Image (cartoon, helix red, strand yellow):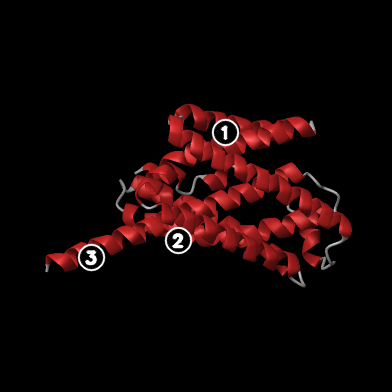
Amino acid sequence: MMHGGYHGGFGGYANPFSRPMDWNALGKFDSITPAVQQHLMRVYACLSTGLMCLALGVYVDGKHHVSGTMTQVLLLGMIFGLTMIKDLYNRLAMFHCVGLLMGCNLGPLVNNVAQFRPDIVMTAAMGTCTIFACFSAAAMFAKRREFLYLGGMLSSAISMMFAGRFLNMIMGGALSSGLYAIELYGGLCMFMLYVVFDTQMIIEDAHNRRGDFVEHAMKLLTDFVAIFVRLLIILTQNAEKKQQREREKNRR
């Protein structure tokens, strides 16, 4: 299936644990200061334009079918480049190229669903925006920063998923069906929690003057795409099951 390559994959594009964990932040419960608010505005503005580039990439792939190994390699190269380049304008350009290439790689999945059920794509997009907004708000307006403890749980969840995939490979795919469902639904829940965790880590980074809004926008873009992909697949599968039940009912 076209979406197999994206299943569980986007979490690896911007690893939230690639930076050192600030355990001192767990005990801080300060309100969001004006400086942090300004930083969040930059992060979400950058995220918004990145999502626009992603949508453009999906459109370009629908018209010209550019997705493939080359776009995947370029995407990984651009993401790696973000960690190396220090100039702000070059980082912004590279970030938007990442969004564009993500869209190109998502194109086959999104356009395949949109060809038959465009309403599912719109539902998945609106659902992702709603989930993202609600969990981001929960992280921002939490009185305490206890959500930062999710970092350990999410790290364990990722480790368990990788262990399950490795075990499935050893067993010759005997666990494929059940493991697929676990990764799909478990991955959706996991990245919803990542929105909370990453948002609070962004706030703490801003408090500590680690205000790299491009890096922070990259983390949230990764979360957004991961939720959208899984939600789109779930809605598509549910629609297919419903159609199958209706066909069986009509045969009777």
- Labelled pair 3, 2 in contact (Cβ < 8 Å): no
21 sits to left or right of 250? right
Q: Secondary structure at mark 3?
A: helix
Residue 63: horizontal and vertical position, in percent? 44, 33
Q: Nearer the viewer, mark 3 or mark 2?
A: 3
Q: Earlier in the sequence, mark 3 or mark 2?
A: 2
Q: Earlier in the sequence, mark 3 or mark 1?
A: 1
Query: In the current view of this chain or complex, which residue is farthest to the right?
Result: 34
Quadrant of the image for the N terminus?
A: top left
- Labelled pair 3, 1 in contact (Cβ < 8 Å): no
Give the residue at mark 3: 246
Q: Is residue 124 above or below residue 75?
A: below
- Which residue appears at 43% of the width and 41% of the height? 5
Q: Earlier in the sequence, mark 1 or mark 2?
A: 1
Give the residue at mark 2: 185
Residue 175 visible (yes or no): no
Mark 1 nearby-residue class (10 Å; few <14, some 14–19, many ≥20)? some
Camera-side residue of 246 and 205: 246
- Which residue appears at 63% of the width and 66% of the height? 134
Quadrant of the rendered image containing residue 110: top left
Residue 98: horizontal and vertical position, in percent? 61, 36
Q: Which mark is residue 76?
A: 1
